[in-house]
Amino acid sequence: MFFFSFLYKSFLEKNSLRKVASEDGFLVGASVSSIPFLEDEKYRKILKDEFNLLTIENDMKFAKIHPQRDSYNFVIPDLIVEFALENDMKVRGHTLVWHATLPDWLTYKNYSKEELTIILKNHIQEVVGHYRGKIYAWDVVNEAYNDDGTLRENIWLKTIGPAYIELAFKWAHEADPNALLFYNDYSNEGINPKSNAIFEMVKNFKNKGIPVNGVGFQMHSSITYSKNYEKIIENFKRYRNIGVDVQITEMDVKVQHSHAPYDRRLEQQADMYSKTLNVCLLSSNCSAFVTWGVVDKYSWIPGFTGQKDAPLLFDNQYRSKPSYDALYKELEENSN
Ligand code: XIL
């Protein structure tokens, strides 16, 4: 009897990415953009049906969540976090320290080292403290390195000095000791000067007892640039050897700038998504795979590149694309 009711239930429940991922405790996620989240019921339905992890695309960034020196705005991120928890999804917090999306009150004034240190500490502790127990992992510091492996010039480096990175991790840990703390960046998935510098920093943090748990690899990709999957595996492995988790945090795959027929481009896109997920599933320290958006029409890519594109898993009619099918198949075959 139990067996038949189980069969009947499985038959009724539509298969989904989250369902096949959850069977193995794997996290499959997407970033959430506030306008469709607030206005588009179909968008929200895809989120809760398909994913067991959400990242808030913009609304936790400094200028959004801390618009005035003495006021915070948690309204939209609170709604998204509540939605996620109600639907049994985890949330990645994005992001506490970045060079971009800073409020004018911060950039238009020259603060002293002491003042900016207090501002950053208060910001991190206020935001992480507000979500204590609700955010599964934070991107504590985002994009702090240049491609040549040097630290990026930004207000934090200029005023506080290179110690801003480790201080940020310490402050975040104090505010929520159970949240996993990540360093997140782009073009850091292979082996190159940038990824080497990030690895050395994280290794050094581990040795010094700075609370870092993982490294995020954004993976904004394009069918016109090939990936060296062997190198990604090698990179993920060196993190495993020092006890650090890795996650794919912002994947999308551009199809613009190609002369191939559209259907072929979508196949190439699917291939790139599934090979990247495959690397993650084969790496025992890779715990999540997140796409940067859900439905093509809401992707940041057209605004960012100035060109039309279709970088995500669902088309503008909310139909799943070959990339969706490829990820589903990959999850079904390779989760362990
Ligand atoms: C992007 C958002 O998707 C856009 O909507 C926004 O206008 C700019 O930021 N790396 C990151 C993300 O870590 O926060 C960025 O998100 C994309 C690149």
Image (cartoon, helix red, strand yellow):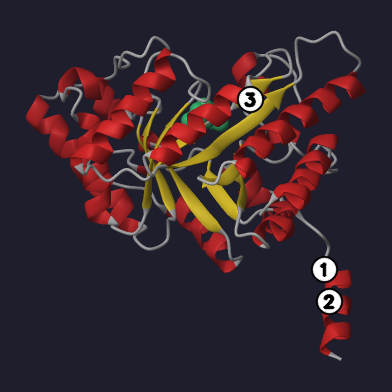
Q: Is residue 226 left or right of residue 120?
A: right
Q: Residue at x 32, y 41 (%)?
A: 66
Q: Is mark 1 within 8 Å of ligand 1?
A: no
Q: Secondary structure at mark 3?
A: helix
For the residue labelled by badge 1, is the local secondary structure a helix, a strand or a loop? loop
Which residue in the rendered view is the most extreme toward the front?
241
Q: CA distance from mark 1 to mark 2?
A: 6 Å
Pick whichever of labels 1 and 3 is earlier in the sequence.
1
- For the residues labelled 1 and 3, the Cα–Cα distance comes to 34 Å
Q: Quadrant of residue 32?
A: top right
1 and 2 marks in contact (CB < 8 Å): yes
Q: Which picture quadrant has residue 262?
A: top right
Where is mark 3, residue-wise? 229
The reply to whether residue 144 is visible in this rendering is no
Q: In the rendered structure, which amino acid carries the disc numbered 1? A: Glu
Q: Which mark is residue 185?
A: none
Residue at image mark 1: 13
Q: Nearer the viewer, residue 262 or 196?
A: 196
Determine whether the beta carbon of the residue marked 3 sits less than 8 angstroms from the nearest atom of ligand 1.
Answer: no
Q: From the image, which quarter does the N terminus lie in?
A: bottom right
Residue occupying image coordinates x 23% and y 21%: 157
Count numbered badges in the picture: 3
Q: Pointer 2: what residue? A: 9
Amino acid at the residue labelled 2: Lys
Q: Position of residue 52 (x, y in %)?
A: 62, 56
